[in-house]
Image (cartoon, rainbow, N blue to C red):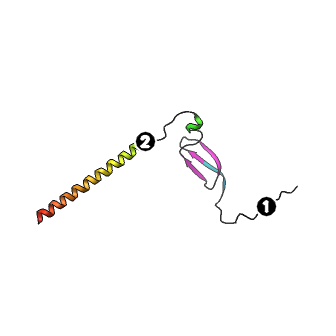
């Protein structure tokens, strides 16, 4: 029995990326597995071998929290703003002393 293919010829030739059926995926935990992809090598931080949903163990992936990072950026911006205002004040004092 012949199988009819109604969408044969629908996919355009020479516009699709190369498909690698044996693409290797490397996880940060050391797990390596193969899958199909348009990339030969894929690096991931979390896979099914180390993800808390699959392992059932709680694991903190983000050691420095988002709030801490935000507070660090805010402190750095405040420091730069204070330095800029100090430079502007010194420049104004120098201009006043010159005049």
Which residue lies most toward the top here?
Answer: 57
Region rendered in magenta = 25-49
In the rendering, which numbered label is found on residue 52? none
Please report the residue visible at 65 percent of the width from the left and 65 percent of the height from the top: 15
Question: Is residue 39 covered in magenta?
Answer: yes
- Identify which residue, 45 or 85, lies in the foreground: 85
Please report the residue visible at 18 percent of the width from the left and 58 percent of the height from the top: 90
Q: Badge 2 local density, few (<14 within 10 Å), some, or many (20+)?
A: few
Q: Secondary structure at mark 2?
A: loop
- Identify which residue, 2 or 42, lies in the foreground: 2
Please report the residue visible at 25 percent of the width from the left and 54 percent of the height from the top: 83
> In screen coordinates, is 5 left or right of 65?
right
Q: Secondary structure at mark 1?
A: loop
> In screen coordinates, is 89 left or right of 99?
right
Residue 57 spot, x, y in % from top left = 55, 33
**Which residue is labeled 2 in the image?**
65
Q: Is residue 89 above or below residue 52?
A: below
Q: Is residue 46 above or below residue 88?
A: above
Residue 27 spot, x, y in % from top left = 56, 44
Q: Badge 1 local density, few (<14 within 10 Å), some, or many (20+)?
A: few
**Which residue is labeled 1 in the image?**
6
Q: Disc 1 and disc 2: Cα gap in Å?
A: 53 Å
Q: Quadrant of the C terminus?
A: bottom left
Earlier residue among tags 1 and 2:
1
Residue 67 spot, x, y in % from top left = 40, 43
């Amino acid at each position: 029995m012949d199988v009819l293919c109604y969408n044969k010829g629908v996919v355009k030739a020479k516009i699709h990326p190369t498909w690698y059926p044996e693409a290797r995926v490397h996880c940060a935990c050391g797990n390596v597995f193969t899958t199909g992809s348009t990339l030969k090598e894929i690096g991931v931080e979390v896979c099914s071998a180390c993800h808390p949903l699959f392992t059932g163990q709680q694991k903190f992936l983000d050691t420095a929290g988002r709030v801490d990072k935000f507070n660090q950026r805010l402190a750095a911006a405040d420091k730069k703003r204070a330095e800029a205002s100090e430079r502007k004040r010194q420049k104004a004092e120098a201009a006043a002393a010159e005049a």
